[in-house]
Image: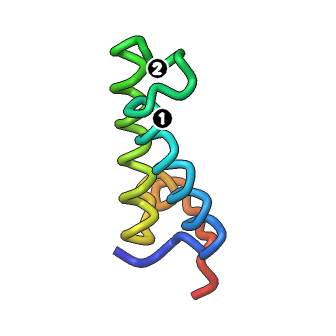
Amino acid sequence: MTANLGNIDRTARLIIGLALFMAPLLNLPAVWSSEGLAIASMGVGVVLAFTALFRFCPLYWIIGISTCKI
């Protein structure tokens, strides 16, 4: 796996991913009181956080996009 995420992209993914993961746990806002939305939000948050940590996005790789300056 070659890195295809730049620093700005990684930071944004990590912040958004953590927010999506934590919001249902804190019930902020109350829209996450639905169990299905809470699970979906946490799933998307985990995926965003892992792509940020590994600096690799499979969707970017399929499309041929790279925000990394390497």
Quadrant that contains the N terminus? bottom left
Residue for point 39% across, 24% down: 38
Q: Residue furthest top?
A: 34
Residue for point 36% across, 15% down: 36
Residue for point 35% across, 37% down: 43
Q: Which residue is mark 1?
A: 23
Nearer to us in this view, 22 or 11 = 22
Nearer to us in this view, 18 or 10 = 18
Nearer to us in this view, 44 or 65 = 44
Say if 15 sits above or below 35 in the image: below
Classify 10 Å Cα crowding around label 2: few (below 14), some (14-19), many (20 and above). some
Numbered badge on residue 32: 2
- Tell me which numbered mark, 1 or 2, is placed earlier along the sequence: 1
The answer to whether marks 1 and 2 mark residues whose Cβ atoms lie closer than 8 Å is yes
Q: Residue furthest bottom?
A: 70
Quadrant that contains the C terminus? bottom right
- Total residue callouts: 2
* Percent of width and height locating residue 22: 43, 41
Q: In which quarter of the view is residue 10 placed?
A: bottom right
Q: Residue furthest front?
A: 26
Q: Secondary structure at mark 1?
A: helix
Tell me the distance, in whole angstroms, between the alpha carbons under discs 1 and 2. 8 Å
* Percent of width and height locating residue 61: 47, 61
Say if 4 sits above or below 13 in the image: below
Q: Residue flagged by tag 2: what amino acid is it? A: Trp
Horizontally, residue 16 falls left or right of residue 38, namely right
Q: How is the image coloured?
A: rainbow
Q: Residue flagged by tag 1: what amino acid is it? A: Ala
Classify 10 Å Cα crowding around label 1: few (below 14), some (14-19), many (20 and above). some
